[in-house]
Image (tube, coloured by chain):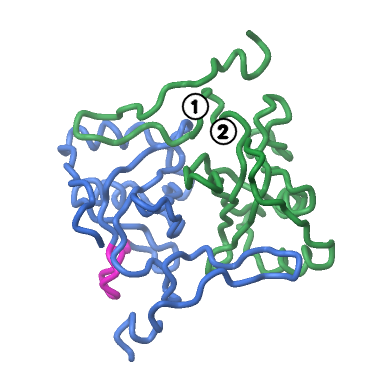
Chain colours: A green, B blue
Amino acid sequence: MTDTAPAYTAPDATTRAAMLDTARFDAAGLIAAIAQQHDTGEILMLAWMNREALDETLRAGRVCYYSRSRGGLWRKGETSGQVQRLVDARLDCDRDAVLLLVDQTGVACHTGRRSCFFSAMRPTGLVETSAPLIAADTLYGRG
Amino acid sequence: MTDTAPAYTAPDATTRAAMLDTARFDAAGLIAAIAQQHDTGEILMLAWMNREALDETLRAGRVCYYSRSRGGLWRKGETSGQVQRLVDARLDCDRDAVLLLVDQTGVACHTGRRSCFFSAMRPTGLVETSAPLIAADTLYGRG
C-alpha cells in the first residue's frame, strides 16, 4: 500500500443503487471483477461479485468479492491482511464486467505472489513469470 | 499497433494441447479473458474464450474470442480491422481466467473507445472517463 494513492469518496446509497441497477449480473447473480494496481497497471486477479459485494465495495472503499466456492461474501484480506483499497470502479460498455483500480497491500494471490496471472503459455509449456514473495503458510497464519 | 512489440512465438500443437488441458473451462466451456495493452498496461476489454478460441489465439498469435451472443468464434478485428496481436498469454493460479498481453490496433471497444471500461462509478453517478476516438459507423464500415 502506498500513502500516495488517491483518496476514494463513496457514492451515497441512492446513487450506488442507481448505478448498480445498470450493471448486468449473470444468471447466478454475478459479475466478473478485474483488480488492477492503480499506479503500476499490474493486473492482480480476476474474481466475482454479486450485487451485495459490489455495493459494499463502493460503500466501504475496500474490495469485497463473492466467493463461488464458499457461497458468500469474501472480504479480500480479512484473513491474510492483504486488503485492496478501492481507488476507482469502472463498468464496461455492456455492463457485465467491472474494473477495480486498487491499492493492493502486499500480495493479491493466495500463493504469495503479487499477481494471480503467473503461468505464461510459452513454446516450452507453462512458465512461471514470478515467484512467491511470501510463503502461503505465513500469509494465512499457519507459519 | 507499434512496431516495437515483442515478437510472439507460437507453441506447437502438442504443447498447446498440454497447456489447454490444465485450463479450467466453465460449465458452458468458457474461460474469462482479459486483454491488456502490453506496454502501457491499459485494460482494453474482458471477453470469453472456449478451448478452440484459445488454441487458435496461441497458434495464430492473433486474439480470437468466443462470442456468447453469436455462439461462435469471434476473430477480434475481422470486421473492424482493430486486431489484437498476442504478445503473451498467462493463466491465473486456479486456471479459470487468462490474461492476454496484446498489441491493440486502434480501439478495442465497439463504441470507438480505446477501452471498454469507461463508465466510472462516482459520487455523482456514472461518469465517462473517455470519449470515442472513432465513430462506431466508421469502425464497422457504415460511415
User: Which residue reaches farthest bottom?
Assistant: B143
Which residue matches tag 1?
A113
**Main SS type for the magenta part?**
loop
Which residue matches tag 2?
A108
Say which chain tag 2 marks: A
Q: Hey, what amino acid is under mark 2?
A: Ala
Q: Secondary structure at mark 2?
A: loop
- Report the residue at 25% width, 62% height from top: B1
Is residue B38 positioned above or below B127 on the image? above
- The residues bearing labels 2 and 1 have C-alpha atoms spaced at a distance of 7 Å
Is residue A63 positioned above or below B14 on the image? below
User: Which residue reaches farthest front?
Assistant: A4
Say which chain tag 1 marks: A
- Report the residue at 29% width, 85% height from top: B141
Label pair 2/1, CB-CB below 8 angstroms: yes
Of residue A79 and residue B27, the one placed in the foreground of this image is A79
Placement of the C terminus of chain A among the 4 image quadrants: top right
Indicate yes or no whether the magenta region holds residue B27.
Answer: no
Q: Secondary structure at mark 1?
A: loop
**Rendering coords of residue A45 (x, y %):** 52, 40
**Rendering coords of residue A129 (x, y %):** 35, 30
User: Which residue reaches farthest right?
Assistant: A13
Q: Is residue B7 shown left or right of residue B86?
A: left
Placement of the N terminus of chain A among the 4 image quadrants: top right
Give, as a single range, the part of the protein colored magenta: B73-83
Q: Is residue B87 shown left or right of residue B26?
A: left
